[in-house]
Amino acid sequence: MFSLNGFSWNKGWWCRYEDEPPEPEIEEGAEEDLENKNDELTGEPIDTEDKEEEQPVERPRKTSKYMTKYERARILGTRALQISMNAPVMVELEGETDPLEIAMKELRERKIPFTIRRYLPDGSYEDWGVDELIVEDSWKRQVGGD
């Protein structure tokens, strides 16, 4: 028998420990005390700092402006899965029915609504929009990039 966080593995099923302490019961008087305390609160809002929407600071990018073949594969696969599950298509269809072909067309037209997060060795990261990256598709034709 294997156990983990209050559960045990028993004959192929996760079960709660039988010797688990019962949940404490709240007495009726205690509930009324809690309700009375809530009634005593004034209707004045609590002052919080109004934080303006902070725009992220544009720092010089450290990573390449080219999309890697691994990023491309993941983007196309993920987007094709979304399209196959009836996600809205971001391009005009011209008879395409294959989700992967539609995803490739969206990538060529730079319409995929994804952001790629690239982690750096120091633990920080850079976020790149798919439309910001230069993509070399399988025909060695560059797509995008200004």
Image (tube, rainbow, N blue to C red):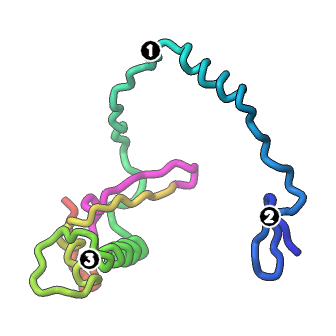
Q: Residues within 10 Å of mark 2 (few under 14, many from 20)?
A: some
Q: CA distance from mark 3 to mark 1?
A: 52 Å
**From which residue to which does the magenta span run?**
120-136
Give the label on residue 16, or none: 2
Q: Nearer the viewer, mark 3 or mark 1?
A: 1
- Residue tagged 3: 103
- Specify the quadrant that holds the N terminus: bottom right
The x and y percentages for residue 93 are: 12, 79
For label 2, the SS is strand
Sequence-earlier tag: 1 or 2: 2
Dividing the picture into quarters, in which one does residue 19 lie? bottom right
**Residue ID for mark 1:** 43
- Between 51 and 6, the one nearer to me in the picture: 6
* In the rendered image, the vertical position of residue 26 relative to residue 105, given as above or below: above
Q: CA distance from mark 2 to mark 3?
A: 46 Å
Pick the front one: 4 or 143: 4
**Residue 32 shown in magenta:** no
* Disc 1 + disc 2, Cβ < 8 Å: no
User: Residue 62: horizontal and vertical position, in percent?
Assistant: 42, 52
